[in-house]
């Protein structure tokens, strides 16, 4: 059953989150595995951008890292730097999301040493990890490339710092960079959507997929 | 000589002994070798030193004083005496010191001196031996020590931050903030936390900054505050099937250490000296299971460990003997270790009063003792024990049950010998017993209504607490028959939902019976005898009072009755009402009737019957409220009769019956002028919430529905209200009726009489002055022209004559002719002698006119005249003395002089009389009434 695309202006968190549940896990609720539309991805990215900002704010406060804005680095890791959508459009996003999913797992593992089971930070990290995996899954559905160069977005070896504070700080900085990345991505997708609508109104047929 | 030699021989050994002793006391063995190293993991200083070989060879017992100092502190931080007996091996000596300050923080110095136990002299101190801290190294950024240390809650921790060479530590603090003792402003910052507590945060972060702001000026660290694990409690191992052993325990409180620092559990078996091959899983409880294998005796130890400590618990058992020692933290107990599996596959057989329950169990070869739990319909739980087990199944019979009743049963078992613990419960099974004849009798009652030619009897029935339907399809059969002639009974059946019916009977006596029936049989009948119809006896209804617990009813008991029945309606307004009844024993004479349906403000009627041999007779009637409420409606004043000082109110249609929410006890009439507070005579004061005062009149007879409020003021606006009151009081005063008392008409009449009429007369007089003057007081001497004052009845010629007999002499004028002649020279003109007389309503005056006396000159003619003064005339004299009037009268005056000379007040003779008059009166007295005077005057 084809999914009804979200209106671009829809920003109700409840609606977005509800749709996200349907999208996040392929085949959720008996839904056949169909490639998502661009509008769906755009709505999902918008929701993830909000979620990333909330996660960073919570992490920074929870880990007592708000002093001197230690986390808010202007030097994000290379894989989270722009341009967000390169010449390949969303195609290049797969690698970033795969890497992010791995990093979120690492952060979660570190935080398990610091928090009791069921702690709020663990719950939020798991939720964000699920969203990243959902977007990754959608991108894979949208761009069913047979194979990608191995290791291109395979997570690198364990280079993470070993000291607890360094781990916390690294995690915080990555979440900050991720939040900014997703915000930029969302903005670019919105702009692109507007452009395509204008083009559509002028009679030109918008491309089905990027 | 000989003596001298002996003395020397004695002294020489003594000196030798003394010398040897003195040498031993002064022998010292200084530290010849001192080496210090540090174990940073354990934060220990390792001190190694040695003394000379001779000391080892002598196996001396020695003492060493060891001092520890820090480089930036002048005082020694630690001093300890270390006693050791040397041996010939010549191994160096060792001492370990635990530092409370991380050894990285600064350099530590150690020195030692020694003393043989036999000696009194300490050796010289060794030189200070130094172990360097990191403060002397060339760091690229500040460094915090210790980092990621796990501290037990309640202990102390000291941290340092070592700045780079030449840098000063500017900030050194913890997040979340805790109270610390810190020292900064040097290259090494120190921070001590006493009695650290877990503050809800998973860890504490330490921040350090030099006096610069670049990234290399910062360092951060964390440390954890936790607790050692609790000893595993309730540790025990058991088997249900002799194949798998499961150990369980409670994991204790939170250690605040998570992830890789969380408590780790391991199980080991002492006899085999092996770790138990099981995987621990913890949720509410921790458990670990493994195959028994060939081993029968186990000594299992569970160890829980985290970075702050280790605890153990042990359980020892032999699955072969099943009764074994259990040891937890050193306490030994005897336990059976068989924990049977739960019974399964339950089935049953049942009668109306018994259930036989069957089940299977897995523990073949183990003699079991089982227990059945039976849940009764009322929620009570009964336990039944059973040891009757067969090879294939077990069973238990539960007796004494109620027919057609659901019971829920489940079973658990334990080892019959060396019982240790029960198995889990089997699945619960719900079983219904078979049907049986209804037990007990129905409680029945009736309501009789007379109709033309007979009676309608409404029959009611209900199940008593002792009644049991004992079946599924219950129905009721009603039978009635004449008592006297034994005619054929009639009967009707009703379904279980019915609880009443109406039958019509004639005026004969009837016997009515009602039975319950189920699929098995009928219950015993309940019987009522309806007596022959007789004239209804009128009973007076008595009022009763309600309480918080119900309505209290009492009656006069009579010994002839074997029970009493009270009936009433829970909803009296319903037609037909839902009749309720309650039976009481023969020794009862009162009851508290309550019902969930009872509400305040509703009148309930109770009938009390006495019953003997199923025949009931009405004894008393009661009526009352659970609680009286104020009347719902105020009396409507239908008629107002108003006078200027009273108002009569009536509210004849106001009901005082059961429609009221209480017994109407009377009425209050409230009155007040609108503009002011009321203070009417005979009333009571009633103050409203707004502090205005009303007059209150109370009528204590509810049937008296008319009242007159008196003593009102005329022409005043009043507000009034009539309120009925019950035992619940009266409603607040909200609405008034308003009246205006009219003017007092009597006052109006009086006013008219006193003011308006005279004013009108005066106005008319003024308007018709001339006419009136002519009419009433014509110009003298023609008074007879007065139409008012003339008397037409008696005329002589043109004059008017009054009969003497009609005149009542009430004034006497006295005159002397001679004197009159002398005093009144103008009187010569008079034709006949007369006396004048004035009679007024209150006084009569005769007075001289002195001025005129001066104006007229007396004449010598001796002639006597009598003059009369008319009151009306004289009273007008003054008024008429106007110039024109006088002018008009002049001609007449010139002809006939008419001038009264003297006036005497006969009532005040002294005042009016002159000496001249007094003399005349003595000589000649003539009595003339005023009327006479007129009559006479006019006759002249």
Image (spheres, helix red, strand yellow):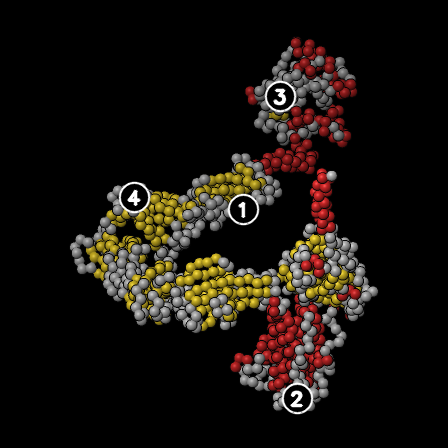
Task: Please tell me whether residue B720 is drawn above or below residue B395 in the rendered image.
Answer: above
Task: Indicate which disc residue A149 carries.
Answer: 2
Q: What residue is rendered at 77% in x and 59% in y?
A: B128
Mark 1 — residue?
B733
Residue under label 3: B930
Pointer 2 and pointer 3 on the same chain: no
Circle 1 chain: B
- Quadrant housing residue B524: bottom left
Protein chain holding label 3: B
Task: For mark 3, give the secondary structure.
Answer: helix
B314 relative to A20 in the view: left or right = left
Q: Residue furthest left?
A: B485
Q: Which residue is at the front of the view, B600 or B366?
A: B366
Q: Residue at x 36, y 69 (%)?
A: B363
Question: Residue B244: x percent and y percent?
Answer: 43, 71
Tell me residue B759's x, y (percent): 65, 36
Q: Residues within 10 Å of mark 2 (few under 14, many from 20)?
A: few
Identify the secondary structure beneath mark 4. Answer: loop
Quick check: can you spot residue B475?
no
Mark 2 chain: A
C-alpha gap between disc 4 and disc 2: 104 Å
Instruction: Kindly identify which numbered label has been placed on residue B587.
Output: 4
Label total for image = 4
Q: Chain of mark 4?
A: B
Q: Nearer the viewer, mark 2 or mark 3?
A: 2
Horizontal arrangement in the rendering, residue B489 relative to residue B852 (left or right) = left
């Amino acid at each position: 059953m084809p999914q009804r695309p979200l209106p671009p202006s829809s920003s109700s968190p409840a609606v977005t989150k509800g749709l996200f549940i349907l999208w996040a896990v392929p085949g959720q609720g008996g839904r056949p595995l169909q490639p998502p539309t661009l509008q769906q991805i755009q709505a999902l990215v918008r929701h993830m951008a909000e979620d990333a900002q909330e996660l960073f704010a919570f992490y920074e406060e929870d880990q007592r890292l708000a002093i001197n804005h230690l986390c808010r680095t202007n030097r994000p890791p290379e894989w989270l730097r722009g341009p967000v959508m390169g010449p390949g459009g969303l195609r290049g996003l797969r690698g970033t999301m795969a890497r992010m999913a791995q990093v979120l797992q690492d952060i979660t593992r570190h935080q398990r040493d610091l928090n009791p089971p069921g702690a709020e930070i663990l719950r939020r990290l798991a939720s964000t990890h699920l969203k990243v995996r959902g977007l990754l899954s959608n991108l894979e559905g949208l761009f069913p490339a047979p194979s990608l160069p191995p290791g291109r977005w395979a997570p690198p070896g364990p280079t993470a710092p070993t000291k607890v504070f360094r781990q916390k700080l690294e995690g915080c900085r990555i979440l900050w960079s991720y939040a900014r990345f997703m915000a930029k991505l969302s903005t670019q997708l919105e702009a692109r959507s507007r452009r395509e609508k204008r083009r559509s109104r002028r009679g030109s047929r918008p491309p089905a997929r990027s | 000589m000989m003596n001298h030699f002996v003395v020397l021989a004695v002294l020489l050994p003594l000196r030798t002994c003394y010398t040897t002793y003195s040498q031993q006391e002064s022998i010292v063995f200084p530290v010849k070798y001192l080496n210090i190293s540090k174990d940073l993991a354990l934060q220990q200083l390792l001190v190694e030193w040695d003394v000379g070989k001779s000391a080892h060879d002598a196996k001396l017992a020695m003492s060493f004083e060891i001092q520890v100092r820090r480089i930036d502190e002048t005082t020694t931080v630690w001093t300890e005496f270390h006693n050791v007996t040397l041996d010939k091996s010549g191994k160096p000596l060792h001492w370990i010191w635990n530092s409370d300050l991380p050894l990285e923080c600064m350099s530590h110095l150690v020195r030692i001196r020694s003393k043989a136990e036999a000696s009194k002299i300490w050796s010289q101190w060794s030189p200070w031996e130094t172990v360097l801290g990191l403060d002397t190294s060339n760091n690229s950024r500040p460094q915090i020590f210790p980092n990621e240390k796990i501290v037990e809650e309640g202990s102390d921790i000291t941290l340092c931050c070592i700045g780079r060479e030449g840098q000063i530590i500017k900030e050194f603090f913890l997040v979340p903030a805790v109270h610390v003792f810190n020292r900064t402003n040097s290259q090494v910052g120190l921070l001590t936390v006493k009695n650290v507590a877990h503050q809800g945060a998973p860890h504490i972060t330490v921040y350090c900054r030099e006096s610069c702001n670049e990234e290399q000026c910062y360092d951060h660290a964390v440390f954890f505050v936790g607790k050692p694990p609790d000893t595993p409690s309730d540790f025990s191992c058991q088997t249900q099937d002799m194949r798998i052993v499961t150990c369980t325990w409670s994991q204790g409180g939170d250690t605040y250490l998570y992830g890789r620092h969380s408590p780790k559990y391991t199980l080991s078996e002492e006899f085999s000296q092996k770790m138990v091959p099981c995987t621990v899983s913890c949720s509410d409880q921790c458990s670990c299971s493994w195959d028994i294998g060939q081993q029968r005796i186990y000594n299992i130890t569970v160890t829980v460990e985290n970075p702050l400590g280790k605890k153990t618990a042990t359980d020892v058992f032999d699955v072969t003997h099943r009764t074994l020692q259990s040891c937890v933290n050193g306490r030994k107990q005897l336990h059976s270790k068989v924990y049977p599996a739960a019974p399964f596959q339950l089935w049953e057989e049942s009668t109306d009063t018994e259930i036989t329950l069957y089940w299977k169990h897995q523990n073949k070869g183990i003699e079991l003792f089982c227990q059945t739990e039976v849940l009764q319909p009322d929620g009570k739980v009964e336990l039944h024990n059973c040891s009757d087990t067969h090879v294939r199944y077990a069973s238990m019979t539960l007796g004494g049950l109620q027919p057609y009743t659901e019971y829920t049963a489940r079973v658990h078992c334990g080892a019959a010998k060396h019982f240790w613990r029960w198995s889990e419960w089997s699945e619960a099974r719900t079983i219904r017993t078979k049907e049986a004849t209804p037990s007990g009798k129905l409680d029945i009652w009736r309501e009789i209504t007379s109709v033309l030619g007979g009676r309608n009897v409404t029959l009611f029935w209900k199940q008593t607490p002792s009644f049991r339907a004992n079946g599924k399809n219950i129905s009721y059969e009603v039978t009635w028959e004449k008592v006297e002639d034994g005619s054929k009974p009639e009967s009707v059946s009703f379904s279980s939902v019915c609880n009443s019916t109406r039958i019509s009977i004639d005026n004969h006596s009837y016997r009515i019976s009602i039975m319950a029936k189920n699929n098995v049989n009928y219950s015993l009948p309940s019987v009522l005898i309806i007596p022959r119809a007789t004239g209804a006896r009128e009973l007076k209804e008595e009022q009763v009072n309600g309480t918080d617990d119900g309505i209290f009813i009492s009656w006069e008991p009579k010994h002839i009755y074997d029970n009493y029945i009270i009936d009433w309606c829970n909803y009296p307004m319903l037609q037909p009402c839902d009749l309720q009844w309650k039976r009481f024993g023969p020794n009862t004479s009162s009851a508290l009737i309550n019902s969930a349906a009872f509400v305040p403000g509703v009148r309930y009627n109770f009938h009390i019957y006495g019953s003997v041999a199923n025949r009931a007779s009405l004894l008393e009637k009661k009526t009352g409220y659970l609680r009286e409420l104020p009347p719902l409606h105020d009396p409507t004043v239908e008629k107002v009769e108003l006078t200027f000082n009273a108002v009569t109110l009536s509210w004849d249609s106001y009901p005082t019956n059961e429609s009221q929410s209480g017994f109407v006890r009377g009425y209050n009439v409230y009155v007040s002028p609108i503009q002011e507070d009321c203070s009417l005579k005979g009333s009571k004061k009633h103050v409203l919430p707004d502090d205005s005062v009303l007059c209150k009149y109370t009528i204590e007879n509810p049937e008296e529905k008319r009242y007159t409020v008196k003593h009102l003021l005329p022409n005043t606006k009043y507000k009034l209200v009539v309120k009925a009151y019950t035992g619940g009081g009266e409603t607040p005063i909200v609405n008034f009726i308003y009246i205006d008392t009219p003017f007092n008409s009597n006052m109006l009449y009086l006013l008219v009489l006193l003011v308006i009429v005279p004013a009108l007369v005066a106005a008319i007089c003024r308007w018709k002055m001339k006419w009136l003057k002519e009419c009433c007081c014509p110009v003298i001497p023609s008074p007879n022209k007065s139409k008012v004052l003339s008397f037409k009845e008696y005329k002589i010629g043109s004059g008017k004559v009054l009969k003497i007999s009609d005149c009542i002499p009430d004034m006497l004028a006295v005159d002397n002719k001679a004197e009159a002649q002398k005093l009144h020279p103008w009187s010569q003109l008079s034709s006949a002698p007369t006396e004048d007389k004035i009679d007024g309503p209150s006084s009569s005056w005769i007075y001289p006119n002195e001025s005129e006396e001066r104006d007229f000159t007396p004449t010598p003619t001796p002639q006597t005249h009598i003059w009369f003064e008319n009151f009306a005339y004289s009273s007008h004299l003054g008024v008429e003395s106007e110039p024109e009037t006088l002018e008009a009268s002049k001609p007449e005056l010139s002809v006939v002089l008419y001038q009264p000379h003297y006036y005497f007040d006969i009532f005040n003779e002294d005042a009016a009389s002159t000496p001249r008059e007094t003399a005349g009166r003595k000589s000649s007295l003539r009595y003339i009434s005023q009327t006479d005077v007129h009559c006479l005057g006019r006759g002249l």
